[in-house]
């Protein structure tokens, strides 16, 4: 169960990183995200990504 949650965190992190980077490069995402506020989804994506990687890496396989 924890491994699945870690994988979900990794996927959400990748989506956040891509969205934040895209919004920053495009000069903002319209009314939703400005150029400087695009750092927020990028940072949250990084946190989710590394938390998911750490969760998947630390869980031991038990059969």
Image (tube, helix red, strand yellow):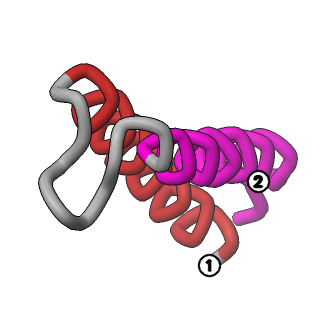
Secondary structure mostly taken by the magenta-highlighted segment of the chain: helix
Q: Nearer the viewer, residue 45 or 32?
A: 32
The Cα atoms of the two marked residues, 1 and 2, are separated by 11 Å
Q: Which mark is residue 46?
A: none
Q: Nearer the viewer, residue 31 or 21?
A: 31
The mark tally for this picture is: 2
| Residue at 86% in and 46% down | 58
Side of 13 where 32 appears, left or right: left
Name the residue tied to disc 2: 55
Dot in front, 1 or 2: 2
Label located before the other in sequence (1 or 2): 1
- Could you classify mark 2 by the number of other residues whose Cα lies within 10 Å: few (under 14), some (14-19), or many (20 or more)? some
Q: Residue furthest top?
A: 25
Side of 31 where 56 appears, left or right: right
- Could you classify mark 1 by the number of other residues whose Cα lies within 10 Å: few (under 14), some (14-19), or many (20 or more)? few
Q: Which mark is residue 1?
A: 1
SS type, badge 1: loop
Specify start and end residues of the magenta stretch as a single range.
38-63
Q: Quadrant of residue 50?
A: top right
| Residue at 62% in and 43% down | 43
Residue 11 lies, in percent from the top left, at: 39, 51
| Residue at 36% in and 37% down | 35
SS type, badge 2: helix
């Amino acid at each position: 169960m924890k491994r699945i949650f870690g994988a979900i965190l990794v996927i959400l992190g990748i989506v956040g990183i891509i969205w934040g980077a895209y919004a920053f490069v495009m000069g903002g995402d319209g009314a939703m995200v400005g150029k400087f506020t695009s750092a927020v989804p990028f940072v949250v994506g990084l946190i989710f990504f590394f938390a998911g990687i750490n969760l998947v890496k630390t869980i031991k396989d038990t059969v």
